[in-house]
Image (tube, helix red, strand yellow):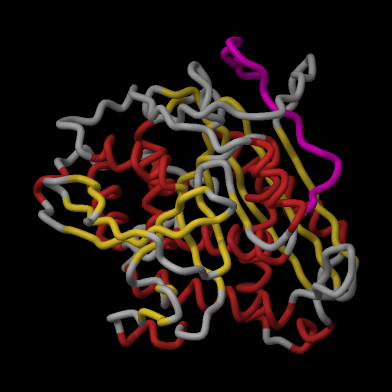
Amino acid sequence: MHLREASYQLPRPGSSLSFNPNRLYASVARCNVLSNASGRVLFAQELAAKAALEDFVDDGGINFGVTDDVNDLGDAKLTSIAHDIGAGIANLYMDDMGYHWVANGKELLKSAGKKPDYVYDLGYVGSGYALMEAKGSVGKSVKKSDMLARVKKAYDKQVEPWLGSTANFRLLQQGYAIGTWARSGNDAEIIVHETEWPVAPAAVSVSGASPSLPLAFLNYAAVFQLVGAPNISSALRHVSLRRSVVDLLSQERLYEIRLGGRPFLRGRNSSYVWYGRSPVPSHDPFLAIESKKRYAFAIDLEIAKEVLSALRRPSVSLEERLELPQIPWDLLRALREEGRAALFADGLAYLPSSKIVGRWQWGTLAGLTREK
């Protein structure tokens, strides 16, 4: 049994998970872009994930389920869809427990060995990292007993061996293997295998807002990739490797939109945005396929300011934490219940397209400034 730091309490897994199609898509898209692949590859994955969820997720009932169409897919496509759905739901499960900041395990864990899919931070001062391996199965071909065995094996082989070691001076202290077993129809279950403690820690209702800087940079690289600001995403990955951002000399234009009076930023290259009654199209022909998209990814403006301010620090210490403003919990809860938009505690949002109320410019030298 590995020791954990005692300055806070670990969250407990819930017995159920509630989400809507927009929240699931945002989670799947986030998992797909937690990678250092090129922006075009990541964008193609985002489009493929959206199309798959629209075609194969049954959103007509109260309970999550997949359509009968999945049973007609070939093995390769079925595996891909199962992975996306499994990762997206597992990430929502972690987020529900308060693990709001996430990085790809292959990027954050440098030692040799088979790595878990994701590494999470609760955002508490003194907290370590949590590890998670996601598994998914859709259709009628996989028995529940087989899925139980897959999840346990994933924990034993990809999670347990890392516990008790460190990354970025943080203890790898808690582990999860989470599987989604979804047969056709509204018949789905979440299977969770987690690190057991002699005394079960009490649940926490809201996480902190101080994730470790190295993990936060990788988390927000994925967020800005979704938002449509690939130059900022590249800069965050660049700095996560302890390089200076001024080496890049890049810039990005961002647009301010509002939801419930709260400001958000979205990028120029993530399809189109509305300015008054006139749509402003993307300048990238590759993104023309998105021209009729009615929803868009964005990031909370106040959180974006803090992230981009940290990006300009002269040096990055692996022991530093990023101090972030917290989005009001009542707003998060209200949007989750309403279902019209998806908003996450780290500032990522998936919102209905709305008119621009301001323009911002970001550059590696000048930082983030509002255009007059």
The picture quadrant where one finds residue 3 is top right
Name above or below for residue 22 compared with residue 314: below
> Could you say where residue 291 lies in the image, as x and y percent from the top left?
45, 85
**Which residue lies at the image location 56% right of the left edge and 38% below the top edge?**
327
Asked if residue 141 lies in the magenta stretch, the reply is: no
Toward the viewer: 226 or 152? 226
The residue sitting at 70% across, 83% down in the picture is 55
Q: Residue at x 26, y 62 (%)?
A: 253
Residue 141 image point, x, y percent: 82, 75
Report the residue at 31% width, 68% height from top: 38
User: Height in image: 304 above or below 85?
Assistant: above
Question: Is 7 included in the stretch rendered in magenta?
Answer: yes
Quadrant placement of the C terminus: bottom left
Q: Is residue 185 left or right of residue 157?
A: right
Task: Give left or right: position of 178 versus 323.
Answer: right
Image quarter where the N terminus lies is top right
| Magenta span | 1-18
| Depicted 286 relative to depicted 322: above or below | below
Q: Quadrant of residue 330?
A: top right
The location of residue 226, given as percent across then percent down, is 44, 62
359 lies left or right of 299: left
When the figure is inspected, residue 317 is found, relative to residue 71, above or below; the finding is above
Secondary structure mostly seen in magenta is: loop
